[in-house]
Amino acid sequence: MSTELPPPTPLSRVLATLRVGLHVLFVFLLTVGAARFLTADPDRARTTPVLVLVAALAGVYLAGTVVESRYPVMLGWLAVVTALWFGLVALSLDFVWLLFPLVLLFLHLLPRAAGLVAVVVLWAIAAFVPAALHPADWSAGSVLGPAIGTVLAVAIYYTYLALHREADHHRAVAQALRAAQDQLAASEHQAGQLEERERLSREIHDTVAQGLSSILLVSRAARGSLRRGDTAAVAGQLATIEEQATDNLAEARRFVRDLASPVLAGSLPDSLQRIIDQARARQDALGEPVDLSLQVAGDAERPLAEPVRRTVLRAAQEAVANVLRHARAQTAVVTLTVWDGEVSLDVVDDGRGTSGDRSYGLRGLSDRVAALDGTLDIDSGDGSPGTTLTVRLPLTGHP
């Protein structure tokens, strides 16, 4: 998982600017207070420790903003800053307005209740300490002005706090979204791997596995012919084994090189005829001939999209393999029909019916057909003769 910090948002930049603005405001008010005090009575300025307190307050405040240490240390820092400010207020009314940034600091560093109590105490210091120490300069505005500044500072702080919480919320949402995106990407990657594995599994079952099964059956038949001394039968069976092995080798190379299957070369009727010829040759080599034939209707030479073409051929391979392996049929007819909007493949045999349970190959074929928004129907009574397999696929595209 990435550990990079999220990029700053406009809201987070506003909050950072407000924090910097608070420090700038403190320095500005301290500087203005010192300048007013010096210009109002230069002789008095030389005889009071105001400038020493101003320098001390500036240094302590700067140290706190730079260090920003742990909570107990910051409370001590705030106490020192407040004490220095109190000393300046005791010497001159010019430093009363430092109350504004101090209120923000107290609200930020103390719990809510304690912070509000401290704010009232700060206002009382700013409003009434000068009344006791500088009665000649004190007026009703000396109470009202700090009160307005205090209320404004409290409003600004809670506005800042709401914005900060909103920024944290958006940051949490962004992090959750990134985590969800990473999880979704991982899930999609895993789903892609599973889908590809399932696709290869169907491809191997429909091609290499069926071919190897044919080779195994024909080789057993050849062994029996050899025991009987029927060399002619053995020669024909070996030729069939060689043909099946050649086709399976080509299929294996296609998996490795991701080349087109040999059975997919040529027109669709030619490819279907090749499947039927291979099936007939195998049955002849086994001594169990089956009358397999192909019929075409409609615009059978029409170019079809590769996924549609491939699915039609795999359906034919699976249906013919089931006819030979399970149905024990004497006759089977494969019919290809290409309409304006769809292509259909019908495989009809006169063998024994099916119980309704679908093999792995038929389940894989059903998935192939469903992926192209097609339909797969198998019409067979429970144990009754004959089965009809029908595949219909929409013509969704062209090469």
Image (tube, rainbow, N blue to C red):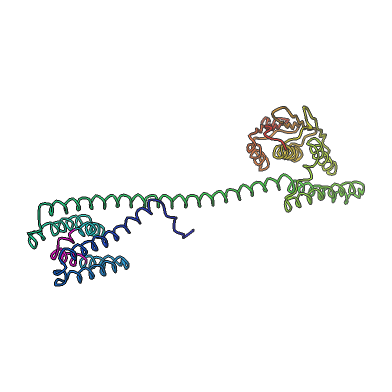
Q: Does the magenta stretch include residue 84?
A: yes
Question: Between residues 137 and 22, which one lies in front from this camera angle?
Answer: 137
Q: How many labels does the image show?
A: 0
Tell me residue 272's x, y (percent): 79, 37
> For the point 73% across and 48% down, which residue is it?
209
User: Is residue 236 visible to us here?
Assistant: yes
| Left or right: residue 297 compared with residue 151 | right
| Magenta segment main secondary structure | helix
Residue 355 x, y percent position in the rendering: 66, 35
Q: Residue at x 73, y 53 (%)?
A: 256
Seen from the viewer's position, the closer of residues 318 and 297 is 297
Seen in the picture, residue 56 relative to 256 is either above or below; the reply is: below
Q: Is residue 390 left or right of residue 286?
A: left
Q: What span is colored magenta in the figure?
A: 81-96
Residue at the image point whose x is 46% and y is 59% from the top: 4
Q: Which of the 4 image quadrants contains residue 385?
A: top right
Q: Is residue 324 magenta?
A: no
Q: Quadrant of residue 119?
A: bottom left
| Picture coordinates of residue 108, whole percent (x, y) | 26, 58
Vertical side of 326 occupied by 84: above or below:
below
- The answer, for residue 326, to whether it is visible in the render is no
Q: Nearer the viewer, residue 17 or 298?
A: 17
Q: In this orientation, which residue lies closer to the viewer: 58 or 367?
A: 58
217 left or right, relative to 156 = right
Q: Residue at x 17, y 69 (%)?
A: 50
Q: In which quarter of the image is the C terminus?
A: top right
* Residue 100 horizontal/vertical position (percent): 22, 56
